Amino acid sequence: MQDLIAKLGPYSSILWLVVIFAIFYFILIRPQQQQQKKRREMLSALQKGDRVVSIGGIHGVIKELTDDTVTLRVADNVNIKFARGGVERVVTDGEE
């Protein structure tokens, strides 16, 4: 290993920076990008009638859906309009 470092000379510090960046990419950046992709897919797949939970913890059923907003029915004659990004997750039958 010492011979390898000696052969690289001034480039060894650059090599270590590349190695550290690669570690950060695979441990931090890539998993976050995958989570964002899953969230975008979930938000684009929302449909009228889906049971969802908002970021604030409000449970409801989607009554109306546009490109930017979601109207949730949370009780009889009580509808709340949210930004589409305010939906945290879709609730399945087994979760509720």
Image (cartoon, grey):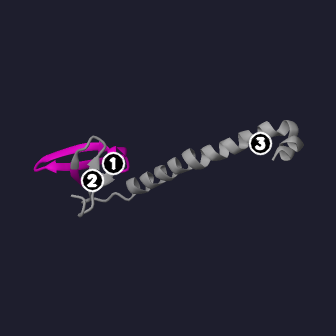
Q: Position of residue 68 (x, y in %)?
A: 37, 46
The residues bearing labels 1 and 2 have C-alpha atoms spaced at a distance of 7 Å
Give 92 or 6, whichever is nearer the viewer.
6
Q: Mark 2 belongs to which amino acid?
A: Val
Q: Mark 3 belongs to which amino acid?
A: Leu
Q: Position of residue 93 (x, y in %)?
A: 23, 63
Q: Secondary structure at mark 3?
A: helix
Residue name at image x 47 percent, y 51 percent: 35
The residues bearing labels 3 and 1 have C-alpha atoms spaced at a distance of 41 Å
Residue name at image x 85 percent, y 36 percent: 10
* Apparent side of residue 37 relative to residue 45 in the rendered image (left or right): right
In this figure, which residue is indicated by the disc labeled 2?
52
- Residue 80 within the magenta-colored segment of the rendering: yes
Q: Mark 1 belongs to which amino acid?
A: Glu
Q: Position of residue 45 (x, y in %)?
A: 38, 59
In this figure, which residue is indicated by the disc labeled 3?
15
**Image quadrant of residue 57?**
top left
User: What's drawn in magenta, residue-wise?
Assistant: 60-88
Give the mark nearer the N terminus: 1 vs 2.
2
